[in-house]
Amino acid sequence: MKQHHPIEASPLHARRERVFLVLAGLFLGTLAMLNILGLLRFIYLGEMATSSFGTLTFAVAVGVLPYPVTFLCTDLICELYGQARANAVVWTGVLLNVWVIFILWLGGVLPGFETIDPASSLPAVDEAGRLPVFFEVRRFAFGAVIASMIAYITAQFTDVFMFHFWKRLTRGKHLWLRNNGSTLVSQLVDSTAVILITWWIGGFEAILNDDSSLVAQLGALIFTGYMFKFVFALLDTLPFYWLTGKLGRWLEIDPNAEHEG
């Protein structure tokens, strides 16, 4: 018979904790990855000519690609483990963002092998006017991580709050409503905040077309990012239903037990 560590009260308890670890690890690993990738590259989706705003470019940042996974993870944690644990994972994500910023800052201030510009005390630019690769990534990542932290805190807590609001309102029924309703609202908050804050910090002027207004291009980026998340929020309903049922039975958790009576 397999022996369990004394901290694991039973095989069932160990199973529940390991599933939680996988969900939390996937959430936090995805969060760190998207913050580093962030807005370093945009995926071109097409253009549309308009009479009022010029040519609008529709693009999705690389960092957005894995983002829907984070909402699936928090929804599963909400459903199976409750609001307190979901909030704990969100706060751990905040600390992870702080850690990423610290390492980026530390890596930039420690002495390296770059030629330093005496006027600015920063690495000198090359003939193309570019900083060394690390400092280029650092500049974009700083903007993306700071924007992501603000957007992340707002969006994730909105997601957790809305999920449990709908769960309480429906007495644990209509799983599809709390899954989609919480994610769609929170991702609108996230898409708007991360684009506007990153632009304000000065991260991605190159994506904007010269023949369209700044407001129109920022609006196009927000709209494209949100629609990407919107589609995947709807698509994750089936895996959310399947995983909730499968994991609920395997872990012997009744997500609706808190609403009985």
Image (tube, helix red, strand yellow):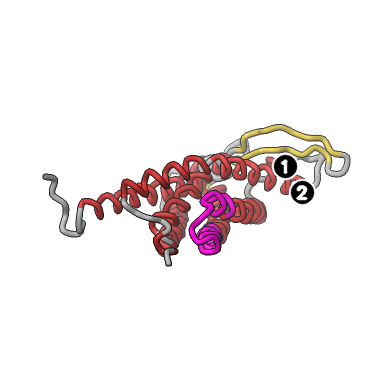
* Badge 1 element: loop
Q: Residues within 10 Å of mark 2 (few under 14, many from 20)?
A: some
Q: Nearer the viewer, residue 179 or 113?
A: 179
Which residue is farthest bottom?
A: 261
214 lies left or right of 81:
right
Q: Quadrant of the C terminus?
A: bottom left
Q: Position of residue 226 (x, y in %)?
A: 64, 46
Residue at 39% x, 51% y: name it. 24
Q: Position of residue 243 (x, y in %)?
A: 42, 43
Q: Amino acid at mark 2?
A: Leu
Q: Please tell me whether residue 158 belongs to the stretch shown in magenta.
A: yes
Q: Please tell me whether residue 133 belongs to the stretch shown in magenta.
A: no
Q: Which mark is residue 214?
A: 2
Q: Position of residue 155 (x, y in %)?
A: 56, 57
**Magenta segment main secondary structure:** helix
Which residue is farthest front?
A: 261
Mark 2 and mark 1 in contact? Answer it, CB < 8 Å. yes
Q: Which mark is residue 208?
A: 1
Residue at 68% x, 48% y: name it. 222
Q: Residues within 10 Å of mark 1 (few under 14, many from 20)?
A: some
Q: Nearer the viewer, residue 37 or 236?
A: 236
In space, the residues marked 2 and 1 are separated at their CA atoms by: 7 Å
47 lies left or right of 246:
right
Q: Position of residue 182 (x, y in %)?
A: 56, 55
Q: Amino acid at mark 1?
A: Leu
Residue at 66% x, 33% y: name it. 44
Q: Which mark is residue 227?
A: none
260 lies left or right of 170:
left
Q: Which residues are magenta?
A: 156-181
